[in-house]
Amino acid sequence: MIKVEFLGPIGKAPVEMEANTLSEVSSKLKEDAVISEWLSKCAVALNDTMVKDLNTPLKDGDKISILPPVCGG
Amino acid sequence: MELYQGPLDTKEIFGRWLDEQANSNYGAYIPFVGTIRAEDDIEALSFDIYEPVLKQWFDAWQVKAQQRGAIVKMAHAIGDVPIHTSSYISAVFSPKRRVALELIDEFVEDFKANAPIWKYDVKDGKRIYAEDRSTAMDGAGLLA
């Protein structure tokens, strides 16, 4: 089981799911129409490190964070 | 890296940073202050921060700065920051001015693009995500 959390303005509670890769996470998140709209503009962190490879393997207990567009300062 | 609830006490922070490096033999100290402007009838801006990723981003910048003999500093506000107060300050110390001038530019611009911080306008006590001023981070769209 992995946990997916949605940061900043997305405003959705974390979800848990079974997934072995980020590709599988993508497929499952797209089942939610609201989240699906956010995905094209969101970056992704795995256990608080930014990731850019869909084939990144996942293991039980991993935390994935969905980061929407930013504007600090 | 320092995070505070509400507006920053800029003079205290800049003064303390200056005191901490008083004997470090840096020839240049360049501070940057971000102040909330009164525009579009906002009362304040408000901020969410994801600290674990922000810390990694900042630590990576500290390594880049050290490779050029410099150090970077930053402080940011969490939550509501009223107009005419400060939400963000940063600074660079370096042996000579040229590195500091270049680094403060690169550091502040990358901060705007990749620091995991979300901004909201506060109007009539409500927070409204500043979507049109926000930038998708490097690697955005991976799961689309």
Image (cartoon, rainbow, N blue to C red):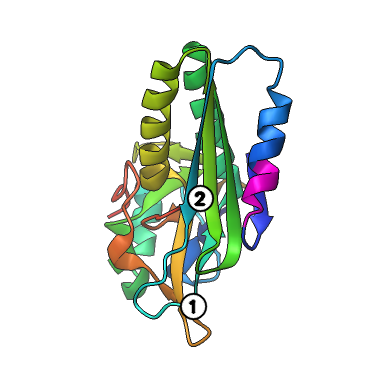
Q: In this view, does B18 lie above or below B36?
A: above
Q: Which residue occupies the extreme bottom position in the image?
A: B124
Q: Is residue B125 visible?
A: yes
Write the residue at 57% across / 50% down: B76
Q: Position of residue B71 (x, y in %)?
A: 56, 23
Which label was assigned to residue A64? Answer: 2
User: Tag 2's secondary structure?
Assistant: strand
What chain does mark 1 sit on? B
Q: Where is residue A8 in the image (x, y as percent from the top left)?
A: 49, 63
Q: What stretch is highlighted in magenta?
A: B8-13
User: Tag 1's secondary structure?
Assistant: loop
Q: In this view, does B33 lie above or below B100?
A: below
Write the residue at 48% across / 57% down: B35
Tell if the residue under mark 2 belongs to the same chain as the one under mark 1: no
Which label was assigned to residue B43? Answer: 1
Write the residue at 54% across / 45% down: B89
Say which amino acid is labelled 1: Glu
Residue A25 lies in quadrant: bottom left
Q: Is residue A56 magenta?
A: no
Q: Position of residue B105 (x, y in %)?
A: 37, 33
Q: Is residue A13 left or right of residue A66?
A: right
Q: Residues within 10 Å of mark 2 (few under 14, many from 20)?
A: many
